[in-house]
Amino acid sequence: MAERGADADLIAQCKQVAFATATTATDATSAARSISAANNSEIGGGAVSMFLMSAGLALVVGGVVIRRGARHVAT
């Protein structure tokens, strides 16, 4: 890609499995299967990251609520 004058964004995008498969596929069925498999593997990572962000947000909100409650009891 670099020898054909591709820019950095295109080269970075080619590192993604689904994009690379779509651009180099010779058979539509096999391309669709490999893109689907790549997308399915990304779903698990996304679910874990969303869970961790939600748990962190719940801890922050809970800490703020507890801290405000402790302040009102002391006064």
Image (cartoon, rainbow, N blue to C red):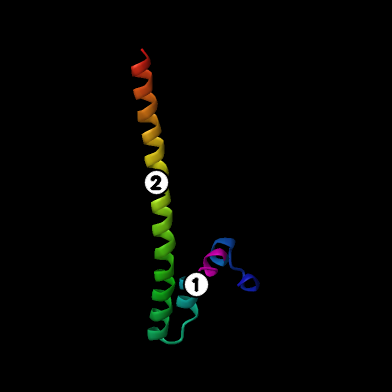
Q: Secondary structure at mark 2?
A: helix
Distance in Å between CA atoms under marks 1 and 2:
30 Å
Membership of 36 in magenta stretch:
no
Predominant SS of the magenta segment: helix
**Residue hosting label 1:** 17
Please, which residue is most extreme toward the bottom here?
Answer: 27
Q: Residue 34 in the image: state x and y as whole percent.
A: 43, 79
Query: What amino acid is at disc 2?
Result: Ala
Foreground mark, 1 or 2?
Answer: 2
Membership of 14 in magenta stretch:
yes
Instruction: Name the image quarter holding residue 59.
Output: top left
- Marked residue nearer the N-terminal end (1 or 2): 1
- Residues 70 and 41: in front is 70
Label 1 crowd bin: few (<14), some (14–19), many (20+), radius 10 Å: some
Depicted 61 relative to depicted 35: above or below:
above
Instruction: Name the image quarter holding residue 58.
Output: top left
Which residues, given as a range, are shown in magenta? 12-17
Query: What amino acid is at disc 1?
Result: Val
Depicted 30 relative to depicted 43: above or below:
below
**Residue hosting label 2:** 55
Q: Secondary structure at mark 1?
A: helix
Depicted 38 relative to depicted 29: above or below:
above
